[in-house]
Amino acid sequence: MGKNKLAKFEEMERFEHVIQFPYRKLKLEKFELKGKWSSGFFKNNNPLIVELGCGKGEYTVELAQKNPNINYIGVDIKGARMHVGAKQVIEKNLKNVAFLRTNIEIINHFFAENEVDEIWLTFPDPQMKKTRKRLTSTAFLNLYKQFLKKEGIIHLKTDSNFQYTYTSALVHLNQFEILAETDNLYESDIVNEILQIKTFYEKQWLSRGIAIKYVSFKLNEREFAEPDIEIEKDEYRSFGRSAREIPEQNLKFQISKNNNPKPRNE
């Protein structure tokens, strides 16, 4: 691990709004805030919204700025990325944000029954080869059901047609209550102030002409089933690291010239 990453991890240990609790630590000690996020951390009874796979925390921070009377927790295992959002929380003096660095596969160990009002899944890896690793798979939905309120909402925002098609098929198959669904968010009539929040990489997808998809739904009490369908895999590839230095208006031209882009993780 690079020195820069280690320095970020060490700095985050001093951030009161960041909790680092990966799987290896959970095996050694109990997570004391489970069921006590409102009383033990935020010190209020405001609704609690969790973003899973928050990356740099851009969406979590923007949501918190727009809704000061709602508590937000960004969750990811990538501490170096999370460090970006964690620093912004301090700079913006936000009191309704926390970051939890842990493995999403064990997320049910950090929240108690009926503790979470909503879950956001923003641009997760579609995991085109491994169904059980998809954040909208039945395996993960069963985890979310353990702590999401009965009327709680799950939001998926994605650039991936594969992820959207799979999730839509699963939602319809299991007869979940669908609140909104579109394969082209910014051309739809459901876009609002919250859905208009765009992360750095979302802007890059849009610059390539890739439509953003969105679906929100509520779970039910039935046993969840996986859709038995063939889904065409995404053909496009992710941005290389150099993309972060490219002005937004030049992205299309630069990427078309790149003959060796970094593959999307599967």
Image (cartoon, grey):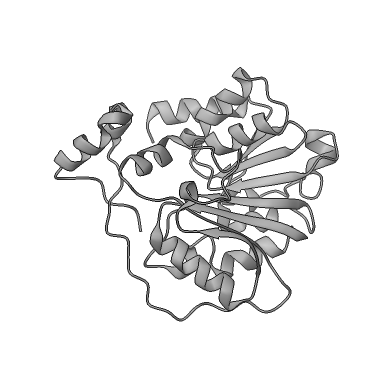
* Residue 14 image-quadrant placement: top right
Q: Is 252 positioned to the left or the right of 173 in the image? A: left
Which residue occupies 46% across, 81% down? 228
Which residue occupies 14% across, 45% down? 259
**Frontmost residue, 163 versus 138:** 163
**Image coords of residue 232 (percent x, y):** 33, 69
* Residue 223 image-quadrant placement: bottom right
The quadrant of the picture occupied by the C terminus is bottom left
Which residue occupies 69% across, 55% down? 109
Q: Is 188 positioned to the left or the right of 155 in the image? A: left
> Residue 45, relative to residue 138: is it above or below?
above
> Residue 105, relative to residue 245: is it above or below?
below
Q: Is residue 165 in view from this perspective?
A: yes
**Image coords of residue 115 (percent x, y):** 78, 52
Which residue occupies 22% across, 40% down? 255
**Image coords of residue 75 (percent x, y):** 59, 44
* Residue 231 image-quadrant placement: bottom left
